[in-house]
Structures are given as C-alpha cells and as structure tokens.
C-alpha cells in the first residue's frame, strides 16, 4: 500500500473533491494526506475571472508543487484544467461525471423565464452571460465571485434576483435543495468538462498511475476529451463564451457546442456525431468556425483563430 499526498485548493468545494478522492483511495488501503495550496485564482477575488486572463489560474501553483515532488497527485474541477498540459504532467483519471448542467438559484423565481424585466442575475462566467443575454436581453448580469456558500447567501439576502452555478458543485456540497431548476443544455450549453473531476500526476510515474486507474471512468474520459479538444481547437479560456457538452447515444458521441459574443448579440451553435473524441471535437470546432466563430474569437482575442490553434 502507498502513502499519497493530494494537492488541492482550499475552497469548500475543492476540499470536498479532494477528500472524496482521499476516501476512495483509503478504501483501497492507502494512507492519504491533503496539502492545501493557494492559487492565483484564490488570491484574486475582487475581479471577474474573464478580466484576469491568466491561463491555469486555479491550477498553476498546484502543478508547481506536483513538479517539485511536494505532492503526488492533484484533484481539479476538470473545467479549470488547461486543455493542453505541459509535458511533465499527465491526466491520470477522469472520474464518473456529475450533472454537467448549470443550476438556477433564486429565492423568488423558478427559472430564467419567470424573472421580471431588468432582474439582477449573478455570474462571472462570460459563457453564462452570453447565453443569458441571448435569451433575455433585458436582464442585468452582475459579477459574482466567492465560494458556493457565500454566493448562495448573497441571493438569499436579496443582492441578486438569481444566480447561476454549476449543478455538480451544488450537489457535491449537499445544497441542491436551494436549486429551483437545472437549465436545459439547449438553453445554456455547459462549460467543457463541467461536472467532472480530473486527477493530475507527474508524467513518468507509472506507480501512481496504476494506483489511480480504478478512478478513471471510460465514458467521462471520452466525453470530456471531446469537449476539451473543441475548446483547444478554438483557443478557448474563461475570456471567451464557449460551451461544449458531449454525451454518448447508441454507442456514438454526440457533441453540442456554442460560441457567442459576451453581450449575447450573436450565438453560434453546432452539433456533431462521431466515435473518436478528439476528431469529433476538432470537426465541431471547424464547423463553428465555418459559421463565423473565427470573427467572434478574433474580436475577443485580437488575433486570428488560426494563429491561436498553432500556439
């Protein structure tokens, strides 16, 4: 049996995720220790994520500890993990996925359609903002940071008429009773990898890789690989409204994806089917570009999408 050190952020949700993995490893007979690491994203709490523009802002410091040998594995919300890992790291496991949808939380309204004109909706996600405004241009979308519990308290205190959160995080913290509805993906396409946990290790560590093999879920691996391939092909990050949701239907992968302008004035959607996750992700990205996604991305990034794909 092994002694394993897990690197994790210190937020309530991150600790739940790390402890969940630790419990599963302990059930296999291993001893486990948690090491809390403060990331750039944890330090910057008064600025919307889309304004920061730091790739890997919730993972960089944890990867540094991993590279230095201070921890043996890192547990991430997969949507926080950059689509292209540095060569010294390896995604050892993608765990069985929770609900990938977004959740609507309000003290007074059941869903987005019930919100009154000019209602205040909290989110710091440009992906959510874009799709919200495309559906309801009259809404006031306001920035929202902090852990899930503090966000919930803000809507309960009346600071917002509603907030949008990832359904999986709410469920993991046993706060689902506060969710009034889960938003259909056709209305709000989720973020690539949303609802999945990824476990990262050092490359060239076959022992730890073998110990984590039982946590790797084949379907979650396939669907999130597909979504992340699309995101990578589009050069996406938190500064760009990109959504992707892959599901398995009758043995085939079906990928729904969107690219939008932050103000919701233009939303492009595409659906593709296939068997190879990476190929399907790239093909669906190409279909979005053919519909005009390159112009949206060029306006946001200030450079051509073809250049982005090569970097």
Image (cartoon, rainbow, N blue to C red):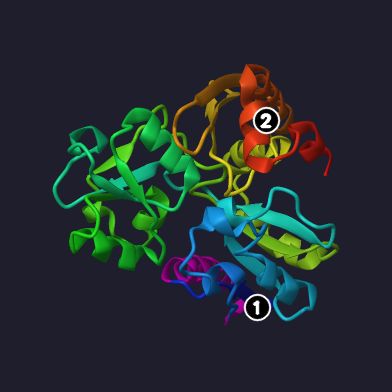
The residues colored magenta run 12-35
Residue 26 picture location, percent across and down: 55, 73
Please say whether residue 182 is visible from this viewpoint.
yes
Q: Which SS class for mark 2? A: helix
Residue 259 appears left or right of 286: left
- Based on the picture, tell me whether residue 16 belongs to the magenta stretch: yes
Majority secondary structure in the magenta region: helix
Q: Residues within 10 Å of mark 1 (few under 14, many from 20)?
A: some
* Residue furthest to the left: 108
Is 136 drawn above or below residue 123 in the view shown?
above
Q: Residue at x 16, y 52 (%)?
A: 107
Say which of 275 and 190 sits in front. Answer: 190
Name the N-terminal-most of marks 2 and 1: 1
Q: Residue at x 64, y 60 (%)?
A: 199
Q: Quadrant of residue 240?
A: top right
Say which of 306 and 83 sits in front. Answer: 306
- Based on the picture, tell me whether residue 249 belongs to the magenta stretch: no
To which residue does mark 1 refer?
A: 5
To which residue does mark 2 refer?
A: 281
Q: Quadrant of residue 134?
A: top left
Residue 42 picture location, percent across and down: 53, 71
Residue 36 appears left or right of 177: right
Q: Which SS class for mark 1? A: strand
Q: Quadrant of residue 147?
A: bottom left
Q: Residue at x 28, y 35 (%)?
A: 138
Residue 144 picture location, percent across and down: 38, 58
Residue 8 appears left or right of 121: right
Give the distance between the C-alpha atoms of the residues marked 2 and 1, in whole angstroms: 34 Å
Is 122 drawn above or below residue 252 in the view shown?
below
Q: Residue at x 53, y 50 (%)?
A: 196
Say which of 213 and 18 sits in front. Answer: 18
């Amino acid at each position: 049996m092994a002694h394993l050190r897990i690197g994790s952020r210190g937020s309530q949700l991150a600790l739940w995720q790390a402890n969940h993995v630790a419990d599963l490893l302990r059930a296999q007979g291993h001893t486990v220790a948690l090491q809390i690491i403060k990331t750039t994203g944890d330090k910057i709490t008064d600025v919307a994520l889309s304004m920061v523009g730091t790739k890997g802002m919730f993972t960089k410091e944890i990867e540094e500890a991993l590279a230095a040998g201070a921890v043996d594995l890192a547990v991430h919300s997969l949507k926080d993990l950059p689509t292209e890992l540095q060569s010294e790291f390896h995604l050892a496991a993608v765990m069985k996925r929770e609900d990938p949808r977004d959740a609507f939380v309000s003290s007074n309204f059941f869903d987005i359609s019930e919100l009154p004109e000019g209602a205040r909706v909290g989110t710091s996600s440009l992906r959510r903002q874009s799709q919200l405004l495309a559906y309801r241009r009259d809404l006031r979308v306001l920035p929202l940071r902090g852990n899930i519990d503090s966000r919930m308290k803000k809507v309960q205190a009346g600071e917002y008429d509603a907030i949008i959160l990832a359904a999986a995080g709410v469920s993991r913290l046993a706060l689902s009773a506060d969710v009034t509805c889960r938003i259909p993906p056709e209305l709000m396409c989720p973020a690539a990898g949303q609802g999945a946990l990824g476990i990262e290790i050092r490359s060239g560590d076959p022992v730890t890789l073998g110990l984590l093999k039982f946590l790797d879920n084949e379907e979650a691996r396939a669907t999130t690989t597909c979504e992340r391939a699309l995101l990578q092909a589009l050069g996406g990050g938190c500064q760009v409204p990109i959504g992707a949701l892959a599901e398995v239907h009758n043995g085939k992968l079906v990928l729904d994806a969107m690219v939008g302008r932050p103000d919701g004035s233009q939303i492009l959607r595409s659906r593709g089917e296939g068997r190879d996750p990476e190929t399907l992700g790239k093909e669906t990205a190409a279909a979005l570009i053919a519909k005009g996604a390159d112009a949206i991305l060029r306006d946001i990034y200030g450079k051509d999408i073809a250049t982005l794909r090569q970097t």
